[in-house]
């Protein structure tokens, strides 16, 4: 296909412009691919679920007898130990489930530790 000499600069400019716009959009403009958007959405939803389930864990923990004394014992432990203790005691497990969702115990421990 023969392209006239007067049209060639316009076509080259259009191609160069498209490349520049694409590079700027993906690097600075915040554009993402479908796969990246799906991964970000999954991460965000997982974090939201963990926060919601951590609230249930806190409620279950505070509903036990002598919750204040148990909270003092819990705060004396390391964050890992707190998370494991909450999971073992069943507070991090949502009613109706067999086991806790990963991250709920730690989120619950953080919320309980922040409580005064």
Image: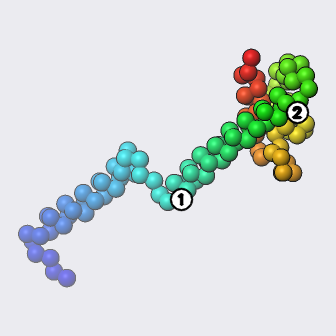
Is residue 31 depicted above or below 57 in this figure?
Answer: below
Of residues 21 and 51, the one drawn nearer to the viewer in this rendering: 51
Q: Residue furthest bottom?
A: 1
Q: Name the side, left or right, on which 24 lies relative to 83.
A: left
Q: Name the side, left or right, on which 54 lies relative to 10.
A: right
* Dot label at residue 50: none
Q: Which of the two labelled residues, at mark 1 and mark 2, occupies the earlier sequence position?
A: 1
Q: Name the side, left or right, on which 111 lies relative to 85.
A: left
Looking at the rendered structure, the secondary structure element under dot 2 is helix
Q: Position of residue 32 (x, y in %)?
A: 45, 53
For the C terminus, the quadrant is top right
Q: Which of the 4 image quadrants contains residue 15?
A: bottom left
Mark 1 vs mark 2: in front: 2
- Residue at the (55%, 56%) spot, across then down: 38
- Residue at the (88%, 33%) spot, across then down: 85
Is residue 42 depicted above or below 55 in this figure?
Answer: below
Q: Position of residue 100 (x, y in %)?
A: 81, 45
Q: Which of the 4 image quadrants contains residue 115?
A: top right
Q: Position of residue 49 (x, y in %)?
A: 68, 45
Check disc 1 and report the residue beneath it. 35
For residue 70, say whether it is visible.
Answer: no
Marks 1 and 2, how far apart at CA: 37 Å
For residue 40, say whether it is visible.
Answer: yes
Few, some or many residues within 10 Å of mark 2 (<14, 14–19, 20+): some
Looking at the rendered structure, the secondary structure element under dot 1 is helix
- Residue at the (68%, 38%) spot, across then down: 51
For the N terminus, the quadrant is bottom left
Of residues 49 and 67, the one drawn nearer to the viewer in this rendering: 67
* Dot label at residue 85: 2
Of residues 44 and 54, the one drawn nearer to the viewer in this rendering: 54
Q: Which of the 4 image quadrants contains residue 47?
A: top right
């Amino acid at each position: 296909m023969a392209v006239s000499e007067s049209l060639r600069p316009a076509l080259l400019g259009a191609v160069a412009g498209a490349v520049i716009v694409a590079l700027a959009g993906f690097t600075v403009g915040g554009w993402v691919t479908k796969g990246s958007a799906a991964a970000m959405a999954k991460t965000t939803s997982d974090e939201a679920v963990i926060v919601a389930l951590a609230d249930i864990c806190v409620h279950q923990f505070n509903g036990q007898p002598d919750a204040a004394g148990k909270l003092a014992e819990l705060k004396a432990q390391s964050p890992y130990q707190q998370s494991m203790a909450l999971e073992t005691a069943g507070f991090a497990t949502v009613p109706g489930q067999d086991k806790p969702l990963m991250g709920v115990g730690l989120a619950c421990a953080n919320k309980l530790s922040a409580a005064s």
